[in-house]
Amino acid sequence: MEHLTLRLFPSVDAAMSYRYESGSGGWIFAPDVRPENAHFTAQHCVILFDIGFTPSSIFTHPITSGQSGRLIS
C-alpha cells in the first residue's frame, strides 16, 4: 500500500511556495476562518496533501473531516 503524506504550513502562500519549489504537486486545503475551525485557524494551519489524495479523500480525512475550507489545485 502506498504511503500518502501531508505537510502543514502557516499560510497558503507558504504551502504554494513549497509545492512549487519542491515540484511535489498535490492539493492545498485552506480552512475557512470560522469558530468550528478554531483548531486550524488558531495555528493558521494550511495542509498540503500529496498528489495521491483525491478531493473526496481530503474532505473525509480525520484531520479535515467536518471542517469547511477550500482546495487549491
Image (tube, grey):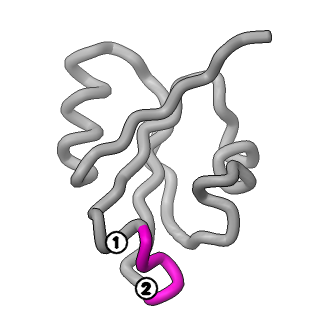
Which residue is located at x 59 percent, y 70 percent?
67
Please identify the dominant SS of the magenta region.
Answer: helix
Which residue is located at x 68 percent, y 71 percent?
66
The kind of residue tagged 1 is: Thr
Report whether 51 appears left or right of 20: right
Residue, far bottom: 35
Q: Residue 41 in magenta?
A: no
> How many neighbours does mark 2 have within 10 angstroms: few (below 14), some (14-19), or many (20 or more)?
few
- Foreground of the two, 55 or 2: 2
Determine which quarter of the picture holds residue 28: top left
Q: Residue 38 in magenta?
A: yes
Report whether 8 appears left or right of 50: left
Q: Are marks 1 and 2 in contact (CB under 8 Å)?
A: yes
Image: 14 above or below 20: below
Where residue 40 sits in the image (x, y, percent)? 41, 66
The kind of residue tagged 2 is: Arg
Where residue 25 sits in the image (x, y, percent)? 43, 23
Which quadrant of the figure contains the N terminus?
top right
Residue 34 — which label?
2
Query: What's drawn in magenta, residue-wise?
Result: 35-39
Which residue is located at x 65 percent, y 32 percent?
53
Could you say whether the residue bearing mark 2 is in a helix, strand or loop?
A: loop
Label 1 vs label 2: CA separation?
Answer: 8 Å
Which residue is located at x 73 percent, y 43 percent?
57
> How many neighbours does mark 1 have within 10 angstroms: few (below 14), some (14-19), or many (20 or more)?
some
Report whether 38 appears left or right of 2: left
Residue, far top: 1
Query: What is the tally of numbered marks visible in this picture?
Result: 2
Could you say whether the residue bearing mark 1 is in a helix, strand or loop?
A: helix
Where residue 73 sits in the image (x, y, percent)? 47, 40
Q: Which residue is mark 1?
A: 41
